[in-house]
Amino acid sequence: MDNKSYRILLVDDEPDILEFLSYNLTKEGFNVRTCSNGKDAIILASQTLPHLILLDVMMPEMDGIETCEELRKISSLKDCIIAFLTARGEDYSQIAGFDAGADDYITKPVRPKVLVSRLNALLKRADKNIIQEKNQTSHTISGSDLIIDKNGYSVTSEGKEILLPRKEFELLLLLSSKPGKVFTREEILYSIWGKDIIVGDRTIDVHIKKIREKIGDKYIVTIKGVGYRFKD
């Protein structure tokens, strides 16, 4: 898929930033739409189904974190990539962003060519995942009270369906694909985020913590200093 086929939604409350980003991304061939607040972003995203949403954190009415959480509840946007582009570079802000379901967190200022490179890496990886899913037959992983439906993109625990953001689902799916195998942090980072996306070890810990909060502590085991494994 070339850049002209990719729909990008830019969300920022500063008109100058929207104009600057829109100009540079349109120049690169992306199909760009913009809006200035989280509430409009949710409506516009539901209508246009963008491939990627670039979202600011600090916005009036509904901030970027809350907007991301709401977007992740919309089933038609389950394959949509959400990346934060913000001046907030603190660790806790990044953790909150990934916790809300973001795929990447990019801090301002960023050069246009670097931003385009990051977006292309995210979109390329998403394309590969979608192609792999389409080529796979329906596959369900069952373990005691936990059922993970790969094609249905759903998780059921003790008869109750659980909503997991995409990265949490992919991480759970990876670990459960080989029960008993210890996945190192490097394997997890490469498999879930890819070699072109820079995230820290803390990102993995946050996602594991959130998965455990939703499905319970008994399935994922921490191997200190190495990584994680799914109980066999």
Image: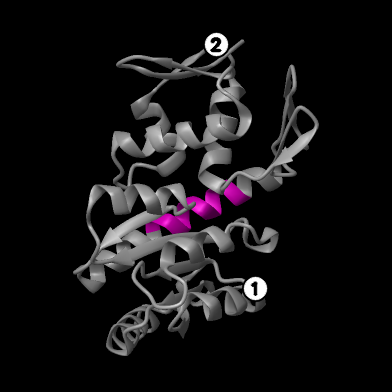
**Circles 1 and 2 in contact, beta carbons < 8 Å:** no
Per the image, is 122 magenta? yes
Look at 48% across and 63% down and name the residue there.
66
Look at 61% across and 78% down and name the residue there.
43
> Tell me, what colour scheme is on the image?
one colour
User: Within the image, what quadrant is residue 54 found in?
Assistant: bottom left
The residues tagged by marks 1 and 2 sit, at their Cα atoms, a distance apart of 40 Å
Q: What numbered label is drawn on residue 46? A: 1
169 left or right of 110 in image:
right
Per the image, is 147 magenta? no
Look at 43% across and 17% down and name the residue there.
222
57 above or below 212? below
Magenta stretch: dominant secondary structure: helix
Residue, disc 2: 180
Image position, residue 64 (x, y; %): 42, 66
Determine whether the residue tagged by mark 2 lies in a helix, strand or loop.
loop
76 above or below 158? below
The amino acid type, in three-letter code, at marker 2 is Gly
9 above or below 22? above
The stretch in magenta equals: 121-130
The amino acid type, in three-letter code, at marker 1 is Ser
188 above or below 203? above
